[in-house]
Amino acid sequence: MVSNTHLDIDITSQRLAIIHDGQVTHQYPVSTAKNGPGERMGSERTPCGWHKIRAKIGAGQPLNQVFVGRRPTGEIYSEAFGRQFPHRDWILTRILWLNGLEPGKNRYREVDSGWRYIYIHGSPDQLLDGTPQSHGCIRMHNADVLDLFDRIGAGTKVFIHA
């Protein structure tokens, strides 16, 4: 069965939209890479092009659950907890792990989005202010990533563009 739903991530407007049958059904603010768009390993840039959701991680975990290496740590993020670890790149609530679909652009070798561990994930809400700030991933407010997680399935296509 072919899905008529995909995600559209616009780096310029810092927006993620769910598109179903050509119509926007939901929109969320996001934060993409502070270094801008780009596909190379180590660039800390958000990769463009077509991707798919490789895996959905975190079902059943509480809001603000901290993840390290795609595993829940048992810690729940709070602003006070964040101040104890000011240099951590927080991955919270849910993870949607992306795989590139375009060989040579965002798949295989030094441009592989999956090997780069590019995710759509929750982030401390107070750190999302409409500007690009991530190290390559697509950061979302925790309630938004939870809502998105429940609306889409693994294998959903994702188009990222500037």
Image: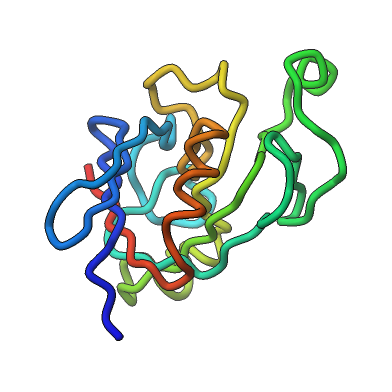
- Is 81 situated above or below 94? above
> Which residue is found at the position 43% from the left and 36% from the top?
33
> Which residue is found at the position 73% from the left and 31% from the top?
88
Residue 143 in the image: state x and y as whole percent: 54, 34
Quadrant in which the N terminus appears: bottom left
> Which residue is found at the position 14% from the left and 52% from the top?
23
Q: Is 95 situated left or right of 61 in this image? A: left
> Looking at the image, which is closer to me, 80 or 160?
80
Q: Is 89 situated left or right of 45 in this image? A: right
Q: Is 157 situated left or right of 110 in this image? A: left
* Residue at the farthest bottom position: 1
- Is 118 situated above or below 142? below
> Which residue is found at the position 47% from the left and 27% from the top?
133
Q: Is 55 situated left or right of 26 in this image? A: right
Quadrant in the rendering for residue 93: top right
Residue 117 in the image: state x and y as whole percent: 58, 58
Residue 5 in the image: state x and y as whole percent: 27, 64
Residue 155 in the image: state x and y as whole percent: 42, 73
The chosen color scheme is rainbow
Quadrant in which the C terminus appears: top left
> Looking at the image, which is closer to me, 10 or 143?
143
The number of numbered discs placed on residues in the rendered structure image is: 0
Quadrant in the rendering for residue 142: top right
